[in-house]
Amino acid sequence: MTLTVTTDPTGNSPISSDNGRQRVQVGDYIHITYDLVDNDGDTDSTGAIKSTLKVYKIAQDGTPTQVTTVQVQDDSTASQGHLSFKITDAFAGAKTIGYTLQEKTSYGLPDYGQFLMVSDIFSSTSPAGSDSEPTPTGDHGPGVTPNPNIVGPITPSSRFVGIFGYDRNGDLDLTINYANTTDPDVYPKYGQTYEAYAWAGDAADPEHGINITGDFAIYEWNLDGTYGTVTAQDKVNGIARGLTITLANNNAASMYQHPSVTYKAGGQGYKLKITAKNP
């Protein structure tokens, strides 16, 4: 059995083609392929296996809950089974996804085999087989997973990156996003250090979103906005790169200089902008 996750329903675009993404998110498609012919040469031409597929949302504590709203597509051929379904909002926040199906053929005596159980689509272990229908538990993968490896948890499709400072204890303060504030009294200051943070979920609530900061290899900082009629422009490789930035203390600092734009007062009067990306 082989499992792939793609951005398209036909299975041609693995999620790694989406800016190097490995994390599975709502809106992706799961494709399960398997050998369809039994030892007697019997096949499944009537969707017998499709009718046995049950899909589960696996919570952070490992508790499985069947998602009954899954719409399964059957694109099987005479020799290979191919079932797929879209990951909907019902799976958002799940640690992983599990499923069970039964080996079945359209004809033959007997016309059925074992139930196969996958409890973690991110595991490279083999499915568990049993004579009775199981519920996904333990560490049982599909056997063959994509390369590069896919990872969880399952995130909402809405992904954001912001700029944050630190509280009095030196911890990241996610209550003030310097990249998205209309408060005239909230702006980055010379000499201060700021940190990029990426999350999936609600744009206005990074504290309760899923931390996906590690999903991006490059964080690029630039000035943003307009001051004294001069609009900031991005620099090649930014004014800095990395998860954090410490702003220089004066207007003449080289980090604020741009090869084709003359700022009236260095970085003064501008906001910060952060871009998260992969090579």
Image: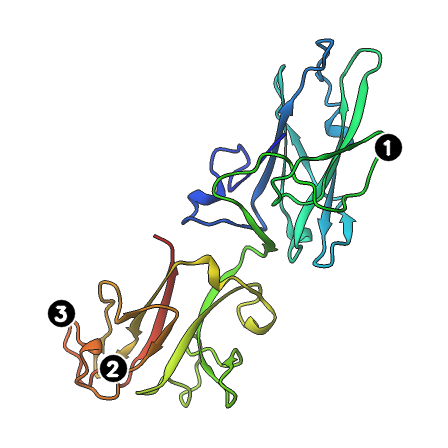
**In this rendering, would 59 be left or right of 223?**
right
**In this rendering, would 227 be left or right of 12?**
left
Q: Residue at x 34, y 52 (%)?
A: 279
Q: Residue at x 61, y 18 (%)?
A: 77
Callout 1–callout 3 Cβ contact below 8 Å = no
Location of the N terminus by quadrant is: top right
Callout 2–callout 3 Cβ contact below 8 Å = no
Return the disc, 2 or 3, that comes first in the chain's sequence: 3
Residue 258 x/y as whole percent:
17, 72
Which callout, 1 or 3, points to the residue nearer the camera?
A: 1
The residue that disc 2 covers is 267
Return the disc, 2 or 1, that comes first in the chain's sequence: 1
Q: Quadrant of residue 86?
A: top right
Q: Amino acid at mark 3?
A: Pro
The residue that disc 3 covers is 259
SS class of the residue under badge 3?
loop
> Gap in Å between the C-alphas at discs 2 and 1?
67 Å
Which callout, 2 or 1, points to the residue nearer the camera?
A: 1
Residue 56 x/y as whole percent:
73, 45
**In this rendering, would 252 be left or right of 22?**
left
The residue that disc 1 covers is 132
SS class of the residue under badge 1?
loop
